[in-house]
Amino acid sequence: MEASFLTKQVPNPNEPKWRSTLSVAMPLNLSYIPIGLACGVLLHAAGFNTILTGLVSIFIFSGGAQFMIASMLTINAPLLSIVLMLFFLELRYALLGSSLSKYLIGTSERFKLIFAVSMNDENYAVNYLKFATDKKWTPREALMVEHYSLLFWTVSNIIGSLVGSALKIDLTVVHFALTALFLYMIIMQVKNRLTIFIGLIAAVLAVFFLVLTKSTLGLVISTLISSFIGFALEHYLRNKKPASHLLYKVSSPGSKEAAVEEESDEN
């Protein structure tokens, strides 16, 4: 019996696609439940009713973006600042989507549109790993993973909103939780010393432009400037000084990229 757990499981050819795909997506789906509940509670505290929370979950489908909306609304940020911050925050999906485009060759434009609007960071990681390690993984199965994760996320957000309507949430706690969340998101993005350096530049610029503009538009300005500085500096170092200490990697061996490479080598 122990040997059966140690051996690699062979997919059952008679198992329906929806069930086998659900088993692939289930770890991600389960991880969404506590985060989705918290997001729903925070969105309700920021002024969203249950219906609006459900709509935001479906049409934005990004935990980081939804937490940012809640954060900026609680400090009465202007709508323009929120829209601009959302635009630049979600712009990364253009790069993520382009890395999956080679696996979607042969699908219709309508399919690609639905696939694009259903993608987020986590289901992208699941699908990228499956495409890289499983030659039988199809775009339709990848889309099912996206829709399963969207379903669990939306339902969790709605339940969180209902819980939030029955509880009185202290906005001071909301500010603390959101700050901790974004610090965690920053740490998870650290790949090398250059990332840390640009992060420090972004922090200094954010404080400077917030004081200068006396508005959250200072965050947008600092984000743009630090992004351009990071892009230009990385391009220069990789082409002119590839041995620079700033390019030394600091990611752990258990990162997603390492997992993909190890799985690819095994296959």
Image (cartoon, rainbow, N blue to C red):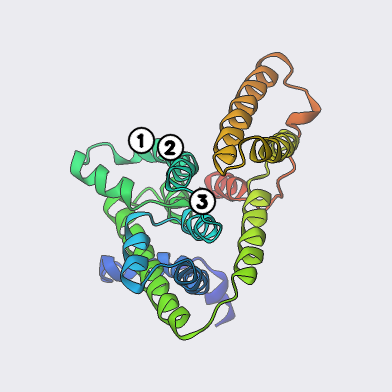
Residue on which disc 2 sits: 99
Viewer-nearest of discs 1 and 3: 3
Q: Amino acid at mark 2?
A: Ser
Residue on which disc 1 sits: 102
Q: Which residue occupies the foreground of this view, 189 or 202?
A: 202
Q: Hey, which residue is sitting farthest right in the picture?
A: 245
Label 1–label 2 contact, CB within 8 A: yes
Q: Amino acid at mark 3?
A: Ala
**Residue 30 x/y as whole percent:** 47, 73
Q: Secondary structure at mark 2?
A: helix
* Label of residue 77 in the image: 3
In-image side of 203 versus 219 (left or right)? right
Quadrant of res 3: bottom right
Instruction: Calculate the distance from the C-alpha at mark 1 to the C-alpha at mark 2.
Output: 7 Å
In-image side of 140 versus 197 (left or right)? left
* Label of residue 134 in the image: none
Quadrant of res 233: top right
- Give the residue displayed 58% in from the left and 50% down from the top: 256
- Give the residue displayed 35% in from the left and 73% down from the top: 50
- Asked whether residue 145 is in view, the answer is no
**Residue 7 x/y as whole percent:** 53, 68
